[in-house]
Amino acid sequence: TMAEADGSTSVEVVTDLAITGKPAQFGRGVMQDVSDKLLGQFVDCLHHRLAEGQEEPAAAPEPAAAVPEPPPEPDTEPSAAIVPDVSAPESTDPGLERQGPPPQTPRQPPRPAPAQDDSIDLGATVLPVLARTYWKQGVGLVAVLALLWWVVRRRRD
């Protein structure tokens, strides 16, 4: 949901996600950390895109003389004859006549996002969480492997 709040917009994101299979074996804490990381990436991306939109220079307002007058109502008669614009260069084609000010250039469409890989590297996201969660088991495994290596090496000698 979005709500206006003191010159900004407050956004609340609620997700309902069912995780099954191998990822579900990581446990709720790991999934919460991954979800927080994904939401953080989303917020950063959204913030970056909104900041890009504000950086575009605003179109300079045109002088009042360049603003075209609204067309006359069909009921009314024109009050003055059309006066040719003498400041404009003459057209070499007699069929082409200048009518009113030049058309305004349309606002540039939003630039496409830079080519980025949209895939999420869960290895980089999950690895720190797994290290924090299972560091004791990892130390025990390394100790057992070191002990086995030492025993095997000692038997060979």
Image (tube, grey):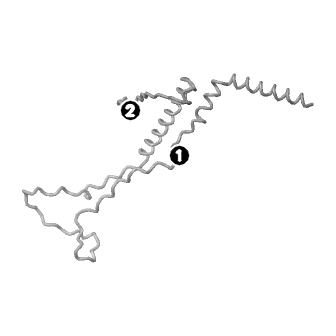
**Badge 1 local density, few (<14 within 10 Å), some, or many (20+)?**
few
Quarter of the rendering containing residue 27: top right
Where does the C terminus fall, quadrant-wise? top right
Quarter of the rendering containing residue 152: top right
Q: Amino acid at mark 2?
A: Thr
User: Foreground residue, 16 or 49?
Assistant: 16
Residue 139, horizontal then vertical, whole percent: 73, 24
Is 124 drawn above or below residue 60 in the view shown? above
Please state if 74 lies on the left or on the right of 118 as rendered. Answer: left
**Badge 2 local density, few (<14 within 10 Å), some, or many (20+)?**
few
Please state if 62 lies on the left or on the right of 31 as rendered. Answer: left
Q: Amino acid at mark 1?
A: Asp
Choose mark 1 or mark 2, whichever is in front: 1
Measure the C-alpha gap from mark 1 to mark 2.
29 Å
Q: Residue at x 20, y 69 (%)?
A: 84
User: Foreground residue, 27 or 90?
Assistant: 27
Residue 89, horizontal then vertical, whole percent: 29, 72
- Secondary structure of the residue carrying tag 1 is loop
Q: What numbered label is drawn on residue 117?
A: 1
Please state if 134 lies on the left or on the right of 34 as rendered. Answer: right
User: Foreground residue, 125 or 52?
Assistant: 125
Please state if 145 lies on the left or on the right of 52 as rendered. Answer: right
- Secondary structure of the residue carrying tag 2 is strand
Q: What numbered label is drawn on residue 149?
A: none
Task: State if disc 2 and disc 1 touch (CB < 8 Å).
Answer: no
Q: Which residue is mark 2?
A: 9
Q: Residue at x 33, y 55 (%)?
A: 106
Residue 120, horizontal then vertical, whole percent: 54, 39
Residue 105, horizontal then vertical, whole percent: 33, 58
